[in-house]
Amino acid sequence: MRPEDLDRTDPEGAIAKAAARVSNWGRWGPDDVLGTMNLLDDAKRREAAALVRTGASYSLSQSFDMDGPQRGWRRRTNPVHTMLDTGCDAAAGVQGFPHGIGGADDVIAMPLQCSTQWDGLGHIFDHGRAWNGRPAEQVVTSLGDAVTGIETVADRIAGRGVLLDVGRTFGEDGELPDGFAITEEHLEATIAAQGPTSAVGRGDIVVVRTGQLTRARREGWGEYAGGSAPGLSFTTVDWLHRTEIAAIATDTWGFEVRPNEFDDAFQPLHQVVIPHIGLFIGEMWDPDALAGACAADGNHDFLLTAAPLKITGAVGAPVNPVAVR
Amino acid sequence: MRPEDLDRTDPEGAIAKAAARVSNWGRWGPDDVLGTMNLLDDAKRREAAALVRTGASYSLSQSFDMDGPQRGWRRRTNPVHTMLDTGCDAAAGVQGFPHGIGGADDVIAMPLQCSTQWDGLGHIFDHGRAWNGRPAEQVVTSLGDAVTGIETVADRIAGRGVLLDVGRTFGEDGELPDGFAITEEHLEATIAAQGPTSAVGRGDIVVVRTGQLTRARREGWGEYAGGSAPGLSFTTVDWLHRTEIAAIATDTWGFEVRPNEFDDAFQPLHQVVIPHIGLFIGEMWDPDALAGACAADGNHDFLLTAAPLKITGAVGAPVNPVAVR
Amino acid sequence: MRPEDLDRTDPEGAIAKAAARVSNWGRWGPDDVLGTMNLLDDAKRREAAALVRTGASYSLSQSFDMDGPQRGWRRRTNPVHTMLDTGCDAAAGVQGFPHGIGGADDVIAMPLQCSTQWDGLGHIFDHGRAWNGRPAEQVVTSLGDAVTGIETVADRIAGRGVLLDVGRTFGEDGELPDGFAITEEHLEATIAAQGPTSAVGRGDIVVVRTGQLTRARREGWGEYAGGSAPGLSFTTVDWLHRTEIAAIATDTWGFEVRPNEFDDAFQPLHQVVIPHIGLFIGEMWDPDALAGACAADGNHDFLLTAAPLKITGAVGAPVNPVAVR
Amino acid sequence: MRPEDLDRTDPEGAIAKAAARVSNWGRWGPDDVLGTMNLLDDAKRREAAALVRTGASYSLSQSFDMDGPQRGWRRRTNPVHTMLDTGCDAAAGVQGFPHGIGGADDVIAMPLQCSTQWDGLGHIFDHGRAWNGRPAEQVVTSLGDAVTGIETVADRIAGRGVLLDVGRTFGEDGELPDGFAITEEHLEATIAAQGPTSAVGRGDIVVVRTGQLTRARREGWGEYAGGSAPGLSFTTVDWLHRTEIAAIATDTWGFEVRPNEFDDAFQPLHQVVIPHIGLFIGEMWDPDALAGACAADGNHDFLLTAAPLKITGAVGAPVNPVAVR
């Protein structure tokens, strides 16, 4: 299916049909809480470790601070980091500790999806159903996600990462324009252009670079959080299912193309891939340093550890993904 | 030096002498912000990747939730995780999103050192001096650590981890009693007992298991946060310097033995190793699952990625360390 | 009805019968959001102003800080107050302001019901119904209380306060023991003992002193937050309705006697008075200084302003009540 | 002194001279923590109570929510209000309480000066000196204001309020333009125009309406927080001292005119009135409803209770001021 074949007036119909095609409900039993993380196994981690060539490491995290992209939508602010003790207190001699020791300490208040993050399986529902068909209200209450909280995958997300630099392949100066819908054809063509280290398969973690973050870094955040953006087309839903990837991440706020490809819509691809495929989505990652290295030597796969902060019951979680190549 | 040779009445003298012996100030130039992370290089990461045998992965993180150990000392609370949207809202049909999509979202407020964490180089000062000799007040103000914030090592902490299960070697039922001072002799004897995969050297990340967390998990937190605990003796300061390790972590609140080994003291070993050695210290890690696997097959080294959340200017940071072995 | 006449095994039946007797649903129209605050009018404020005799003022607020009573139940912590700028920064000369100005600034994170507070009308539901019969899920979502948020009474709560010092009247050394159920008889006897300035009627704000806070201040918080406590008997529900008071506050965590007067119960009196009577309840107030003055000269009524912080959509709100007498 | 007589190039000189003229250091003894609140006494409260004519009450608080004016400057965000429990949870039957009770609860994270607020005496320093001449670092550390925390006036701020509607007197359609410097002449002319109920004297709380908030409410916040604004001229410093008022509040972000009246300056009037006069300043108040009533009947004084939230050690505090007239 191509973007132009979508009926822009019927997101609900398209979502229902796609969900029927790609559903993984029951695939790993009725009690499953891992979704596509089931596909990332020990063999994959051994394969990933063998990919380490130079030993150079790269963080794929944006900075967590007040200069972030958030503008308050649905109370998503940038992180507020405050100090409990400082070097100034120590210098002023007011800390009251013995033998000349001084200390600094700090605290943070932040939405869990304010910056580089994983969407957990409890983040999105389709008509009141969460991953594996569970009623949303039995999964995520005001106490958090009692079933598929991010802690369930805290020890899992280390494996083979593959960078698909769609921005560099199809963009001008390495950047896709806002509103650019990445299709299956773009993904496959990027793989072909990048060469054999870019093959994508079962259990892999795909990192898609659109270049929007590069632009935002240069021009300012603007509407990065929730505005127009390049991203995956709704039509990639079958590719996302068929490839059996464990996870996919982008350098954008919302993973899918924005404006969305239906007239009155809000993140329709999320509505299929999270509750029906059980797919883990990473957002607001920063692949730029890594992408530079991949482009330089042509190797696009690497060992990727992207362990979310182990917050009990979280429906999303901040993460500092680290690639070693 | 042995613990019994310490003059309990003179922490300040002992600290000054130790600092003079082990100082790394200037070792990596006047502008250095990495401390012992300079010792963890690409070659070490290649070596670490080659240690992956089974591909099994282990999180060394405690859970971040209200059931944590904090009791409010110096405003260190447990994490407060609240929801911005829930499955109950979705089920009630009050979210106002189109085409049947529903969502959950969340926020957290927490001290950066409330649970599994790294101490940054700006965390501790000695007589008003931070790492590399900088005046504390020029490093850490109320705006955070402007020089050695945790973001400086966000892309670095992936390398060879070595578990030293001192609890299993010297404890009863695998647990050292509170107040047990781990000496250089205990560390070396543990290495010898565990065998050749436990060799510790330049650039390694050492994880010391005391067993206190195992006990707390069984008996309740009690005074885990700040009370009596097994931990490293002040006398290990030369070993910590000589081995040229990049970092060391424990399963306790405070890394060093408590009560401290001086009459009127507060964390004297911190006062040397952070500002003078530039050593990264991990606290409140959970090595138990990993330790079980290590004991089972005798291999005690592994690939360890322990990338702190990239919070600009943080003097400490939460982390989900993941070992792949 | 007396406490001993309650069927301890049937809270649900007792609640239903009481609700039927005292319901104010519809009394002020179908769109009402004020409940008993309708009863506090301009005439009452004129009456209250005329009660000012000496002009002395008293805060009835506890301190908002980490030394508060909360122990984490349902994520209710004590307030965490942190600084954004300090005098130490100013002294260190690191603030970067011109012409010698320096500043301090601060931030707080706290549950809205962590200390001296008003319960809003959206705080409690009976079988899914909120004040005036509205479905709970149409009133309070994850976005807050869209109908009866505390802001609706932000300009109202100033009027005649009456202190009923039940602790001084019936307690030993001025303190009722934990578990003491205050009945209508106790209230009326206190009024009689205190004399004519204690008459309670339409639109008044009643402050009941049990003395438990006095004890907690002396002996430590213990189980103040949620444990045993003196408080109003479930049987006072008719008195609370019949007197047509605008609000009532106590010096305890939970207003009603604890343990509650049914075998398996949680705050049954709340379940009637908030959603059915529409009554405003204040908790964790500190009446001690005021009570001393009242006892000294025998005047027990005063001008009371208890304006909640105007937090949009809050189901409860912190307040610093001030009595002028 | 008139604004045009100020040497725009020498704020430091002007501040020093003004401080010398108006200093109250030592006036109430070396241990004083109340500053001008010493001037608000019981007699003034009796006088204020007698001003209640109709009994109508008015909140002078803005709304505390995400739609506020803050834009993140120095980590000042708008309040983030989140729910711990909701009516949706109750409706979904997931709360686990007995006998049909359901509940909602909430939490907030906010800067203490994000909306309607009092500046405490520890908020501003002059060359490292706080109120009454104390060294700033001995007053406000990372633990808060240990000397003049807002709790010291928690029981005091109830008295006679006087509205000076400078906007209505000098503005077009009731609003002063941004950058309009209110002088002593404007204040006195407003008093004269409004009539005898506007007389200002010892112990009064003056509320100055500029109309900027009215404009922001109509046109959007824009640069309300920190941008250009009408406000008091630096030259009013003598009037503020001579009148012996207890406090003054405005409907603007920063009380004084912005841009400030010196070339390179930041809030120079604050630098004199807070540390030297010990004056309490209110900011971001909303006088519009009250102003309408005052204009209608010509009475501009009233009973004003503006009790700050009693946050221990706060250098500023949110408040819901209530006028009864």
Image (cartoon, coloured by chain):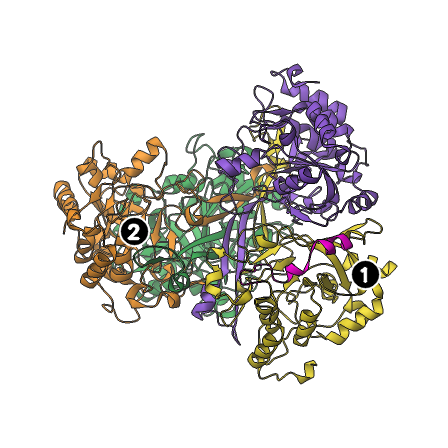
Chain colours: A purple, B yellow, C green, D orange
Q: CA distance from mark 1 to mark 2?
A: 61 Å
Q: Residue at x 63, y 70 (%)?
A: B227
Query: Is residue D75 shown above or below B220?
Result: above
Label 2 packing within 10 angstroms: few (<14), some (14-19), many (20+): many
Please tell me if label 1 and label 2 are on a single chain.
no
Three-letter code, disc 2? Gln
The image's mark for residue B34 is none
Q: Which residue in the rendered view is the most extreme toward the right?
A: B297
| Side (left or right) of B113 relative to D295 | right
Q: Which residues are magenta?
A: B29-48
Out of B195 and C230, give the one closest to the viewer.
B195
Is C288 contained in the magenta span?
no
Which image quadrant is residue C98 in? bottom left
Residue C1 seen: no
Out of D306 and A212, give the one closest to the viewer.
A212
Residue designated by label 1: B300
Residue designated by label 2: D267
